[in-house]
Image (spheres, coloured by chain):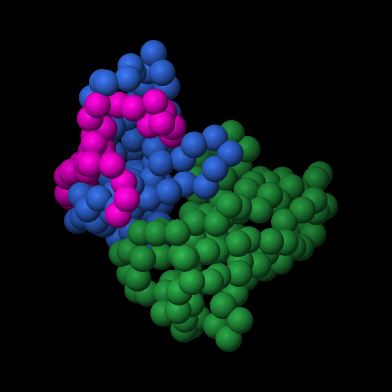
């Protein structure tokens, strides 16, 4: 059974840093692209970042570019999101999601339950 | 960036109704579109991918259509468990944008 489980959320001060993790199981982790998607309280979904299976191609939303870094450790089947210079508008539930394929154009087939990040001003 | 406009943003419907949600893209995205359902406090789940392919395990009353810039999600014979918020997402070009969502509520 495919599972992805986020951790690392919490309360952080404005300008601070946080590192999210996503532990994956039930599939060959290195064969699939992975994403982070967030949802601010009461708002819609916002795509954050994407990384391919090898970890050598990454993409970011303009709202986080230069502040967030996506990475992965395929030996541990774990995805990361390093978040720096956090702002109030980064407050959201952050979801880890597995793409259906490694490569372009595939949807987000499996999602974790999410981890809440709250940035206090 | 590709903008996705969903309509309506809110709809009220009754059990047994047929509802249609539209997603318009600001440029041609071929068939690189997915639909997700999200219930309160839960993670989204994919219903339709590649514009019209039904995800395994999703009831056949859900169907997707369209290509290019106009897409639809149709729910036939609306069931109580279908009351939720629905999002479209384009997968053609980064950033992989979502539509604003359509909340389906019980009339």
User: What span is colored magenta in the figure?
Assistant: B56-85
Q: Nearer the viewer, residue B80 or B84?
A: B80
User: Is residue A114 toward the left or the right of residue B45 in the image?
Assistant: right
| Residue lying farthest to the front in this orientation | A1
- Asked if the stretch drawn in magenta spans residue B59, the answer is yes
Whether B27 is drawn above or below A16: the answer is above
Residue A66 seen in this snapshot: no
- Asked if the stretch drawn in magenta spans residue A95, the answer is no
Q: Quadrant of the C terminus of chain A?
A: top right
Q: Which chain is green?
A: A
Whether B36 is drawn above or below A68: the answer is above
Q: Which residue is painted at 39% across and 13% down in the image?
A: B107
Q: Which residue is painted at 76% across and 48% down in the image?
A: A119
Spot occupied by residue A46 in the image (x, y as percentages of width and height): 50, 49
Q: Which chain is blue?
A: B
Spot occupied by residue A28 in the image (x, y as percentages of width and height): 45, 79
Residue B43 seen in this snapshot: yes
User: Is residue B105 toward the left or the right of residue B67 in the image?
Assistant: right
Spot occupied by residue B104 in the image (x, y as percentages of width and height): 39, 26
């Amino acid at each position: 059974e495919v599972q992805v489980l986020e951790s690392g959320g919490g309360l952080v001060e404005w300008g601070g840093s946080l590192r999210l993790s996503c532990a994956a199981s039930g599939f060959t982790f290195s064969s699939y692209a992975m994403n982070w998607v967030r949802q601010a309280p009461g708002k819609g979904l916002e795509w954050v970042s994407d990384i391919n299976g090898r970890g050598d191609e990454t993409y970011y939303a303009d709202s986080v570019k230069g502040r967030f870094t996506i990475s992965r450790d395929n030996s541990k089947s774990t995805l990361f999101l390093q978040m720096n210079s956090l702002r109030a508008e980064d407050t959201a539930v952050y979801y880890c999601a597995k793409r259906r394929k490694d490569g372009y154009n595939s949807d987000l087939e499996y999602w974790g339950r999410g981890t809440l990040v709250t940035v206090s001003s | 960036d590709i903008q996705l406009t969903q309509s309506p943003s809110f709809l009220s419907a009754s059990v047994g109704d047929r509802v249609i949600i539209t997603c318009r893209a600001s440029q041609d995205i071929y068939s690189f579109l997915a639909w997700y359902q999200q219930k309160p406090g839960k993670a989204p789940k994919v219903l339709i991918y590649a514009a019209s392919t039904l995800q395994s395990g999703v009831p056949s009353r859900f169907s997707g259509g369209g290509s290019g810039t106009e897409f639809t999600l149709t729910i036939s014979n609306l069931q109580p468990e279908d009351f939720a918020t629905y999002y479209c997402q384009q997968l053609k070009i980064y950033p992989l944008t979502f539509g604003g969502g359509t909340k389906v509520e019980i009339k």
